[in-house]
Image (spheres, rainbow, N blue to C red):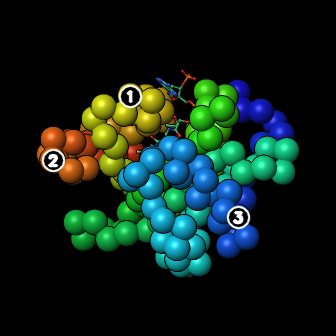
Amino acid sequence: MPNPSITIRRAETSDLKEIHQIEVECFYEDAFSQSQMKEIIKDPGFIFLVAIMNENIVGFIIGGLENFRDKTVGHIYSIDVKPEYRNRGIGSLLLESMENLLVEEGVKECYLEVRVDNMAARNLYFKHEYRFFELLSNYYGAGKDGIRLIKKLSVKE
Ligand SMILES: CC(C)(COP(=O)(O)OP(=O)(O)OC[C@H]1O[C@@H](n2cnc3c(N)ncnc32)[C@H](O)[C@@H]1OP(=O)(O)O)[C@@H](O)C(=O)NCCC(=O)NCCS
């Protein structure tokens, strides 16, 4: 169960430094730059959420709407939780919060991509009912395959 003291809200440009620090901790040299992340936060085409615990940002998720094979679908671009805050439900809470907003936007499907060797993320997504859609050879660079997953979103009661 997620810690009840965790709240989820939209990211603001004043969060940039904290968000970028998490991005670098998670993705090292593949991390987005601070200026790229600033553009994403400001772009209304993205849904950028942060998880807050004790007034600190401990994780974030970036998603949005996209045209994919003639349909408007949800797409999750990135999810990062600070290493010392993992395995306590924060990734799940971020994912569920994003899906709820995507449902509010009226989309019925959500896609995302993940490296085949990223077992933590794969398990997170499979636990949340994402299913294999297609293999993406060399998607993350030479020899670094990805998989695209899909979830049928449904309005929660
Ligand atoms: C993937 C990530 C966001 C998960 O965040 P989290 O807050 O630890 O996730 P949760 O605590 O909600 O875990 C939910 C499920 O994910 C899976 N999971 C999480 N960490 C795992 C690990 N280290 N190994 C295997 N499965 C793991 C489990 O199925 C877990 O369910 P369980 O607790 O019932 O076993 C986090 O590990 C992370 O930030 N990784 C680095 C960035 C990254 O790879 N992002 C994804 C890019 S596509």
Q: Residue at x 44, y 55 (%)?
A: 31
Amino acid type, mark 3? Asp
Which disc is residue 142 wearing?
A: 2
**Image position of 86 (left or right of 53):** left
The part of the image, by quadrant, that contains residue 121 is: top left
Instruction: Residue 15: give its label.
Output: 3
Identify the mark at residue 119; answer none if there is no mark: 1
The numbered mark, 3 or 2, whose residue comes first in the sequence reads 3
Q: Is residue 131 left or right of residue 123?
A: left
Tell me residue 61's x, y (percent).
Answer: 55, 54
Q: Nearer the viewer, mark 1 or mark 2?
A: 2
Q: Residues within 10 Å of mark 1 (few under 14, many from 20)?
A: few
Determine whether the beta carbon of the residue marked 1 sits less than 8 angstroms from the nearest atom of ligand 1: yes
Visible residue check, residue 157 = no
**Callout 1: helix, strand or loop?**
helix
Within 8 Å of ligand 1, the CB of disc 3?
no
Q: Nearer the viewer, residue 82 or 70?
A: 82
> What is the crowding at mark 2: few (fewer than 14 residues within 10 Å), some, or many (at least 20)?
few
- Looking at the picture, does residue 87 appear above or below residue 24? above
Amino acid on which the number 2 mark rests in the picture: Ala
